[in-house]
Each structure stands twice: as C-alpha cells, then as structure tokens.
Image (cartoon, rainbow, N blue to C red):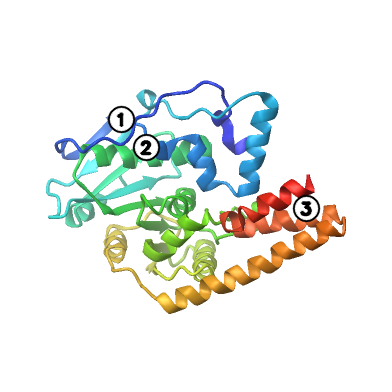
Amino acid sequence: MRALGLCLLAASLPWVALPVQSQQGSTGLQSDVVFDSYSPLTSNTELVRRLLSPLAAAQVEASLKTSGQRLIQQSIELAAERFVVYVPARAPPGGYRLLVFLPPWQDARVPSGWEAMLDQYGTIFVSAARSGNEENVLARREPLALLAAVNVMRRYPVDAAQVYVGGFSGGSRIALRLALAYPDLFHGALLNAGSDPLGGAAASGAPPPPPRELLEHFQESTRVVYVTGERDISHVAMDVSSLQSLRRWCVFNVASQTIAGAAHQVATPPALSGALHALLASPDVRPAQLAACRADIDRTLAGELERVASLTAQDKRAEARRLLTEIDLRFGGLAAPRSLELLAKLQ
C-alpha cells in the first residue's frame, strides 16, 4: 500500500484522450518543457490494473471501499512538472523513434554524448525531472514516463511501432515493469545496468506478469535489450537472471551486450548505438516454441490453482492462502480471474 502514495486521494484531475498529432514542434535540446495532455493509459485505475498483481489490486479496492475513498484519475499535475526533450533535426521517413528514459537521478538531462546517436537513429529522447530512485514508483515515476510518451507523440510525428522505454540502474528496473505492462505503447525496452526476473517473491522486486492479453502482446512484439558494463558484476548477474526468466516466460525477443571495461555507468555513445540498432531488429517469431511454452505455463498454473481449491475444501485455509499469495506473485494476471474467485472463497 505504501507504493500507492498520492494515488489514494478522493479528488480527481481531468484526463484528456491522446489527440491527433499536431505539426512538428521545435528540434534540438529543450529543457524545462511543460506538457499538458493526459490519457486514459495514465489513469490510476489503469496503472493498478496493469502494474499490480490481481490480489494486490483487490486489496487496494477493498481498502478504498472501507475508507470511503476512491482512486483519483491522475496522480500527476502536469503544470508543475518539467521534462527534457531532445529532437533530432531530421525524422526518418516513417516518423521519429522515441525513447522514454527513466533515470536514477532527480534532474532531467540527456546522458553525455547521446545526442549524436539519437540523431543517427532519428530518435527523440524524453525524461522527467523529479523521477529518480527516491520518488514513489506508482504515483510518480511510472505515470511521468507514460505521460512523457503520450505528449511527445502528440507534438511530433512518431512511428508508433518504434516507441521504446529505457532507463539506467534503478530507472532501468522501472522501465522493464512499464514494458511488461504497456506493450501496446512501448515496443522495446533498453535496460541499462538494472533488471529483474519476472514473477517471484515481493521482496525480490520482481514484477508480476500483467493480465494475459498484455503478456501475450509483450511476448510477441516487444524487443528487450540489456546493456551493462563488463565490470559491473552484480548487475551483469542480474541481467543473466532476468534474461533467463524472460525466456522461461516465453519471451524470445531479447539481446544482451556488455560495455568493455565499464563499471556501473550509463551506456557509452557506442553502446547506445548498438542498443538502438538492436531495438530495430525484426521480432524473433517462434510460433511453435511460443505455443508450447505457453501451454507448459498454463498446465503448471492450473495445477497450482487446483491445489489451492483442494486445500480450501479441506478447510486448510491458512495453507491455501499462503499458496494463493505465492501464485499471485509468480503468475500475476495470468492467474486471474480464478485467483480472485479462490480468494473470495477464502474470505
């Protein structure tokens, strides 16, 4: 519940649907940019649905009902926020690519030397101020990144199939969460020295899988690129664990590169170039392997849910609840609505 922060307020800000793109705005480096458009994608109802596990979302709903409160529609007051935007002078024929960047630091800036690579790949860069590691994830960091994408796509001709989310260190871990939960917006993830496995104990920081339709979209169309310094041993190990986890979850559109001689640092311009090139690669489509992998997961999940039902029927409620919590963290949205039905029986 702590992660919701400002989400649990009764007031509401209006949202504005993503409008038709206007004429192209200014190019080059722009600081202290103010955006003004909201979207249903950034509403707290949608954030909870996509980013929290079903049981966690149910807990939020129950807490709000008990307190007589409701989720505000938007937790960000855009007029008070500032963004940095870098726009190459020339857009590719199909429109700009877009990289939404989540930093671990508080100021909004383009990492040193990145502009030339952004120009080379026709990629707009946008990042929010006050969205570093110390900020609330669900109330600020995630909606700020989503709002950045929505507003840049409104102001510039962006190729919707080439919209990426990325970050460095702690920001990279949030970028992975957003890529999982919003594969209909972000079609690639650039993970620079920060990653997590998919599903697992809450203490591990591992994100739960999103609802089934979103996970399947992610499996089929999202490209994930890991970039970490070869001397950043702990984060290289995290990347290996994360990449292996994604493969177990039927995600095959992955690539990994290490930065020679580098420790825990932002990607160098050549490393960024390699990552952007990798993001442009065609999806690694493996229909038969994907179908078999999904079927294996579904069989395992069905067996685990049946165990919960059996324990509940035997009135072993404490054991059933513990197992259901584990399933919720591991399988997330894939376990719903059955996990919610079992929770109702336990209550």
Query: Which quadrant holds the C terminus?
Result: top right
Q: Is mark 3 on a helix, strand or loop?
A: helix
Q: Which residue is drawn at 83% across and 58% down?
A: 313
Residue 35 numbered mark, or none: 1
Q: Where is residue 140 in the image (x, y as percent from the top left)?
A: 47, 35
Instruction: Indicate whether 159 appears above or below 228.
Output: above
| Mark found first going from the N terminus, 3 or 1 | 1
Q: Where is residue 199 in the image (x, y as percent from the top left)?
A: 59, 59
> Do labels 1 and 2 touch, CB within 8 Å?
yes
Mark 2 to mark 3 CA distance (whole Å)? 37 Å
Mark 1 to mark 2 CA distance (whole Å)? 8 Å
- Amino acid type assigned to the residue bearing label 3 in the image: Arg
Q: Nearer the viewer, residue 337 or 209?
A: 337
From where the camera sits, is residue 87 visible? yes
Residue under numbered circle 3: 321
Residue under numbered circle 2: 147
* Residue furthest right as drawn: 315
Mark 3 to mark 1 CA distance (whole Å)? 44 Å
| Mark found first going from the N terminus, 1 or 2 | 1
| Mark found first going from the N terminus, 2 or 3 | 2
* Residue furthest bottom as drawn: 288
Q: Where is residue 63 in the image (x, y as percent from the top left)?
A: 68, 32
Give the class, few, some or many, for how many residues have Cα within 10 Å of label 1's Cα (few <14, many ≥20): some
Residue 122 appears left or right of 205: left
